[in-house]
Amino acid sequence: MPLRRALIAFGSVSFCYFGYAGLFNTYAPLWFSSLGFSTLAIGGLASLQAGTRLFSPYVWGWLADHTGQRAELLRLAVGLSLLCALGLLVPPLAGWNHHAWITVVVVALFICTAAVIPISEASLAQLVSHGDGVLDTRRYGRVRVWGSVGFVLAVSASGFALQWLGVGWFPALVIGTLVLMLVAVYRLPAVSEPAHTEQTAQGALAVLRRPVVAWFFAGVFLTVLAHTSLYTFFSLYLVSLGYAKGTVGLLWAVGVVLEIGWFWFQSRWSQRLSTHGWLVLAAAVTALRFAAVAAFGQVGWVLLLTQCVHPITFAAQHTACIAVISQHFPGRLRGRGQALYAVLGYGASGVLGGVAGGALSDAHGFSAVFWAASGAAVLSAMCCWRALVLERAAPSA
């Protein structure tokens, strides 16, 4: 398959997956509530989603690396996801109550969809990396940008659709999105990897124990942990300060639009710093961003500025992470490297950030959550700096 067609295929998968993620994460709580789930039960389902990220991505990544059949496994995972989503429309089995049935179906859906990112990102990173393992940030950004576009369009369009049709149509929208994703993954090329390399023989966990890689993942964990304050508590914080919901939506839109622009044009700036240098910068800016949110939440123009740095704290940080993982986890380690990114970066931090943030907000208010996020980002900058120093000392490691 020509490279351009392959990149379009990966862009389609990114568009569909992040569209699905935006739809599900935004509107599933409303649907659960319409079924009679309590707030505690809805929170429990969110925790289960984060919990599945502690193991499911690595299992899928391990299978993809050991079989070498990434495209086939991705099709299997999305097909199983679609079957799970159909279960949202099926009456409970005999002896099951409705809430228990929905919970089991949703958890199974989480486990299956957890395969998409580690496998697709591993295949894409291989496709757009140079022979020396250096990620082509221009091509990667031009593909990844469609994930952000899909997220924005899905959240916006689904909001109007559910308002017009009713929240009961939520499962149908999820099923439709997964059908589109299944079509997209069947258009992916079969990207082959060498079966054996020296690093493959060592294993992914051996690579993880290298000091530069360990410090890198420590920095990733802390940077994403800091961002759980944004994803989980930012809207609640703004509403508690008296901001209108339209203003809250506008602030979110500013961040996402600039994120899209960064992914599209990032190759113009990516060479100005090393990948670890970008991670240090992203962590430092994150610390300043959330300190400003905590201290000046009542000042609208300050909040606008904090959203304007989202391309650095998220988009630039994410691309740098993919580049580092592509360097240290080549060949048949790619899937597990991406899976470790999902597990250590987003699974563990999501569980800890949600629980700790909730406890902090109950005890000391939402501003305390953002002060804690700023502190986590400071620690992240220190870890990223250590990884930078180690990488410079041993660039071939």
Image (tube, rainbow, N blue to C red):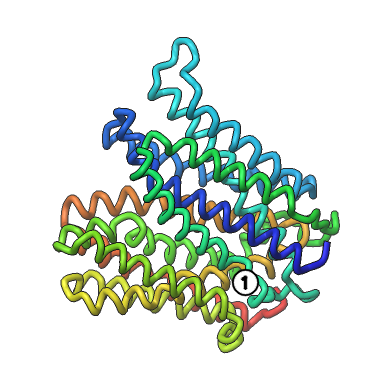
Residue 148: x %, y % from top left: 51, 63
Residue drawn at x 35%, y 65% is 252
Quarter assignment of residue 232: bottom left
In the rendered image, the residue lying farthest to the front is: 164
Quarter assignment of residue 203: bottom right
- Name the quarter where the N terminus is drawn: bottom right
Q: Is residue 69 above or below residue 108?
A: below
Tell me the residue that label 1 is attached to: 142
Q: Is residue 67 above or below residue 124?
A: above
Name the foreground residue: 39 vs 168: 168
Name the foreground residue: 189 vs 247: 247
Neighbours of disc 1 within 10 Å: few (<14), some (14-19), many (20+): many
Residue 157: x %, y % from top left: 43, 53
In the rendered image, the residue lying farthest to the bottom is: 272
Q: Is residue 386 visible?
A: no
Q: Is residue 94 left or right of residue 292?
A: right
Residue 123: x %, y % from top left: 72, 59
Q: Is residue 134 left or right of residue 217?
A: right
Residue drawn at x 27%, y 65% is 370
Residue drawn at x 69%, y 70% is 327
Q: Is residue 355 visible?
A: yes
- Name the quarter where the C terminus is drawn: bottom right
Residue drawn at x 64%, y 70% is 140
Quarter assignment of residue 98: top left
Which amino acid type corresponds to the residue marked 1 in the rendered image?
Arg
Residue 396: x %, y % from top left: 72, 77
Find numbered disc 1 in the image and state the secondary structure of the residue it sits on.
helix
